[in-house]
Structures are given as structure tokens and as C-alpha cells.
Image (spheres, helix red, strand yellow):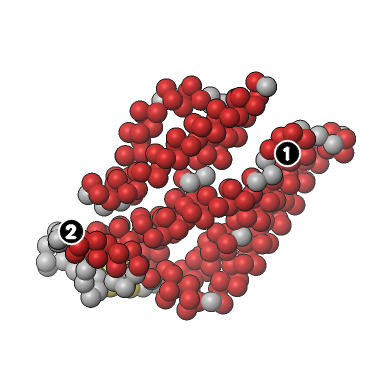
């Protein structure tokens, strides 16, 4: 740690953190404003994309089901539901909130950069050298997770929930906020879950977890993963396996990373 940071008081550290947060918020709002101006693309192409049967995921699953001769709901002209808005400010509020979320996702690398600038003075030279790829790897994992949530979890959920009926007398008319919430939560949750190796890295550095602990509780983690997959996907085995596999792989990668950290600390 540099002498300048050694001599900083607790309040000075808080002040520095405040400016890192302010710059991050400015970046998120600035990118969000650009997204706000791109309303047609954000909503018609991205948000409402999984509602169309021409969405790439449905096309692929329809072709796969047809190839193996299995009946599926992925082949069709359109979903049997409509999206509606029932409040005066509903569409405008959805527009603003969606723009902010899009701003956060797109500016995620810069937010990480500000976070890294705050914690890096407290690291040793060797630790800084080993962590140079932190921003790139973390951002890559986050974006992969967001894409996984958008192209896998979201369409699987929409296909199941949008076609599910307790009776033919009950029509599916979903509120705009509910539909956007599904797309947003599926994408963001996956992005955060895919940060698991990075989280384990820092927890191992802090001595909170060890490779032995991760291996010891692996079977419980597997059960938790299956429960999580059951919650965020339709109740069919194929969908749950599709979601569970990458999470299990991430857990195994986290164990490997934890072992490397402990090995380096021992040296």
C-alpha cells in the first residue's frame, strides 16, 4: 500500500469511496440515457424478443425436437398471451427502469474498474500482478451469464409460463412490469451467478473459504443448484439440467481457483 493511502483516515477512505461510487453512477446514468433514446431497439428487439416465436432459442429447440421426433411447444406461430399496461405511468416507468438496468449492464466493466481502483492500493505488488485480468475476466463472466439468462432461462420460462393454463376459460394477459421483471431477473441473476469464481477467489484470499470446505460441501451445493434451477426454470427435467450444468461447472472451476490461491499463499 502506498504511503498516501497509509496516511489516510477512515473518513478520507469513505470520501474516496464516495467519489468512486459517484463516478460509477454517472457512467450508469449516461449509458442509461443513451439506452433511453434507443427505445424501439431496447423494447421491440431485446425485451420483447423472447415473446416472438422467431427468437433464436425457439428456432433451435424446435428444429432439435423435430429432428428427434418429439412434440414440443417451441414450434408455433405465436404465444397464446398478450402483454398489457394497466397503469397511467406504467409504460414510462418501465422505459426508465429498463434504461437504467441496461445502463448498469453495459457499464459493468467501468463499475468494476472503479471498484478495482479503490481496493488496488491495498494490495501487494505481486497481488496486483496476478490480478491484472480481474476486470476483463469478471466482465466476461458477467456478460456470458447475462446472455445465458437471456437466451436460455428467459425463453424457457416464457415458453412454459406463457402457455400454461389451469383452464381454457382463463386467458393469459400479463402485465408489462411482470414480463420485463422476468427478463430482467433472469438475465441479471445469471450474470451474478456466473461471477461465482471471482467471488470464491476473494473469499479464499480473505480466508473465509478453503478448497477443502468447497469440496466437503459440494454435494450440498449440488442440491442447492438443482433447487435453484427448479425455481428459475419450468418444471421439466430437460430445462433444469440445461440450467444446472453451467452452474455445476462454475462451482468446480471455483474449487480449482481456490486451490491455486491457497497454493500461492503457501509459497
Badge 1 local density, few (<14 within 10 Å), some, or many (20+)?
A: some
Q: Secondary structure at mark 2?
A: helix
Say whether residue 54 is left or right of residue 167: right
Residue 222, compared with residue 29, is above or below; it is above
Q: Quadrant of the N terminus?
A: top right
Which residue carries the number 1 mark? 128
Answer yes or no: is residue 235 visible: no
Q: Secondary structure at mark 1?
A: helix
Count of picture labels: 2
Q: Position of residue 266 (x, y in %)?
A: 65, 20
- Pick the residue in front: 89 or 61: 61
Q: Residue at image x 46%, y 68%? A: 94
Q: Position of residue 90 (x, y in %)?
A: 43, 71
Give the quarter of the image for residue 246.
Answer: top left
Badge 2 local density, few (<14 within 10 Å), some, or many (20+)?
A: few
Nearer mark to the viewer, of 1 and 2:
2
Q: Residue at image x 52%, y 44%? A: 195
Q: Residue at image x 36%, y 39%? A: 225
Q: Residue at image x 38%, y 32%? A: 221
In space, the residues marked 1 and 2 are separated at their CA atoms by 51 Å
| Nearest to N terminus: mark 1 or mark 2 | 2
Residues at badges 1 and 2 in contact (C-beta under 8 Å)? no
Q: Quadrant of the C terminus?
A: top right
Which residue carries the number 2 mark? 68
- Pick the residue in front: 225 or 267: 267
Amino acid at each position: 500500500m502506498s504511503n498516501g493511502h497509509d496516511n489516510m483516515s477512515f473518513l478520507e477512505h469513505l470520501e474516496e469511496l464516495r467519489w468512486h461510487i459517484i463516478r460509477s453512477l454517472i457512467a450508469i446514468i449516461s449509458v442509461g440515457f443513451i439506452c433511453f433514446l434507443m427505445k424501439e431497439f431496447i423494447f421491440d428487439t431485446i425485451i420483447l424478443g423472447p415473446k416472438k416465436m422467431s427468437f433464436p432459442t425457439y428456432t433451435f429447440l424446435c428444429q432439435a425436437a423435430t429432428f428427434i421426433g418429439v412434440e414440443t411447444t417451441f414450434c408455433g406461430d405465436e404465444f397464446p398471451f398478450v402483454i398489457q399496461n394497466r397503469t397511467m405511468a406504467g409504460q414510462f416507468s418501465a422505459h426508465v427502469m429498463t434504461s437504467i438496468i441496461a445502463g448498469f449492464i453495459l457499464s459493468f466493466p467501468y463499475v468494476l474498474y472503479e471498484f478495482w481502483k479503490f481496493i488496488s492500493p491495498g494490495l501487494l505488488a505481486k497481488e496486483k500482478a496476478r490480478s491484472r485480468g480481474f476486470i476483463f475476466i469478471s466482465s466476461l463472466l458477467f456478460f456470458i451469464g447475462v446472455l445465458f439468462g437471456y437466451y436460455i432461462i428467459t425463453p424457457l420460462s416464457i415458453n412454459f409460463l406463457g402457455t400454461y393454463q389451469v383452464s381454457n376459460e382463463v386467458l393469459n394477459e400479463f402485465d408489462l412490469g411482470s414480463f420485463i421483471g422476468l427478463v430482467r431477473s433472469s438475465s441479471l441473476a445469471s450474470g451474478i451467478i456466473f461471477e461465482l469464481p471471482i467471488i470464491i477467489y476473494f473469499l479464499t484470499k480473505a480466508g473465509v473459504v478453503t478448497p477443502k470446505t468447497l469440496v466437503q460441501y459440494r454435494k450440498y451445493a449440488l442440491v442447492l443448484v438443482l433447487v435453484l434451477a427448479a425455481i428459475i426454470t419450468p418444471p421439466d427435467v430437460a430445462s433444469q439440467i440445461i440450467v444446472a450444468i453451467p452452474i455445476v461447472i462454475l462451482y468446480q472451476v471455483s474449487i480449482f481457483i481456490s486451490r491455486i490461491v491457497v497454493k500461492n499463499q503457501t509459497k
